[in-house]
């Protein structure tokens, strides 16, 4: 009787180990692999979805140039929108957030701001030479990039694991674009130039 119980116990142990091994093999891989070594106290962000890119006019003015009034002139643009680099609603950009924005730039295919930045620092005056009478829109703007990032935390202790704090929103923007458009111009839909042309209500 004792030998039978020992045999049954060994058999149960083998079956349990086999079952655990089967679970280990068939279990899906983690959707959130550890983002590198957790050995420095601080935070780390990584993008979790394709970034959304949209044009944004930040400064604009419309000008009617009549015959006899052509030539060089300095115009003052009106600020119509402010765009800033932010993460989780904060304009304070850490080194980790700066690294995140650098990766975002690679993902969208153009340079974006990676430090604390705002379009409000742009000059509101522009100098242009209007040689032909017409209705013009003088503008400044940028491509706004928005998305979500995973926020990981590290206490910096030896062999401490990364802790996922959740996802946070981020925003950055491209280099500033400036120009002049008229009603006669035709531009790709969704471009900054097309957005500026719409200000003319042609």
Image (cartoon, rainbow, N blue to C red):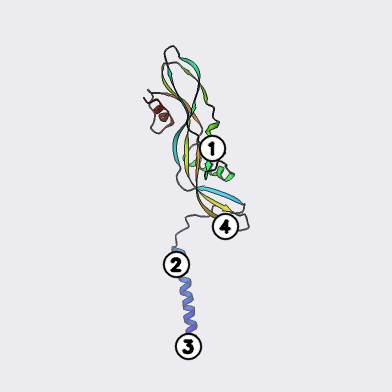
Residue 36 shows in this picture: no
Q: Secondary structure at mark 4?
A: loop
Q: Residue furthest left?
A: 202
Question: Rounded to the nearest whole Å, what is the CA distance between mark 4 and mark 1?
Answer: 31 Å
Mark nearest the camera among 4 and 2 is 4
Question: Rounded to the nearest whole Å, what is the CA distance between mark 3 and mark 1?
Answer: 77 Å
Measuring 60% from the left and 58% from the top, which residue is drawn there? 160
Q: Which residue is mark 2?
A: 22
x and y percent of residue 30 in the render?
A: 48, 57
Q: Which residue is mark 3?
A: 1
Q: Secondary structure at mark 2?
A: helix
Label 4 CA crowd tier, 10 Å (few <14, some 14–19, many 20+): some
Question: Rounded to the nearest whole Å, what is the CA distance between mark 2 and mark 3?
Answer: 32 Å
Q: Which of disc 2 and disc 4 is earlier in sequence?
A: 2
x and y percent of residue 11 in the render?
A: 47, 78
Q: Which residue is mark 1?
A: 113
Q: Which of disc 2 and disc 1 is earlier in sequence?
A: 2
Mark nearest the camera among 3 and 4 is 4
Q: Which of disc 1 and disc 3 is earlier in sequence?
A: 3
Compare residues 148 and 3 and report the one nearer the observer. 148
Q: Is residue 47 above or below residue 182?
A: below
Q: Secondary structure at mark 3?
A: loop
Q: Which of disc 3 and disc 2 is earlier in sequence?
A: 3
Question: Rounded to the nearest whole Å, what is the CA distance between mark 1 and mark 2?
Answer: 48 Å
Q: Is residue 168 above or below residue 82?
A: below
Question: Rounded to the nearest whole Å, what is the CA distance between mark 4 and mark 2?
Answer: 26 Å
Mark nearest the camera among 3 and 1 is 1
Q: Which residue is mark 4?
A: 161
Q: Secondary structure at mark 1?
A: loop
């Amino acid at each position: 009787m004792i030998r039978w119980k020992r045999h049954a116990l060994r058999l149960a142990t083998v079956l349990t180990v086999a079952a655990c091994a089967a679970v280990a093999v068939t279990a899906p891989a983690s959707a959130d692999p550890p983002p590198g070594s957790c050995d420095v106290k601080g935070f780390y962000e990584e993008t979790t979805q394709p970034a959304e890119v949209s044009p944004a006019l930040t400064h604009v003015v419309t000008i009617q140039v009549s015959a006899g009034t052509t030539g060089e002139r300095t115009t003052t643009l009106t600020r119509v929108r402010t765009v800033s680099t932010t993460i989780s609603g904060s304009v304070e950009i850490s080194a980790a957030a700066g690294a995140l924005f650098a990766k975002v730039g690679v993902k969208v295919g153009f340079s974006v701001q990676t430090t604390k930045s705002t379009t409000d620092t742009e000059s509101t005056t522009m100098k242009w030479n209007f040689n032909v009478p017409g209705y013009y829109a003088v503008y400044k703007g940028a491509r706004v990039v928005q998305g979500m990032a995973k926020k990981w935390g590290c206490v910096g202790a030896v062999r401490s694991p990364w802790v996922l704090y959740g996802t946070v929103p981020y925003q950055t923007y491209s280099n500033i674009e400036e120009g002049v458009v008229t009603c006669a111009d035709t531009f790709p839909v969704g471009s900054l130039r097309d957005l500026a042309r719409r200000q003319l209500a042609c």
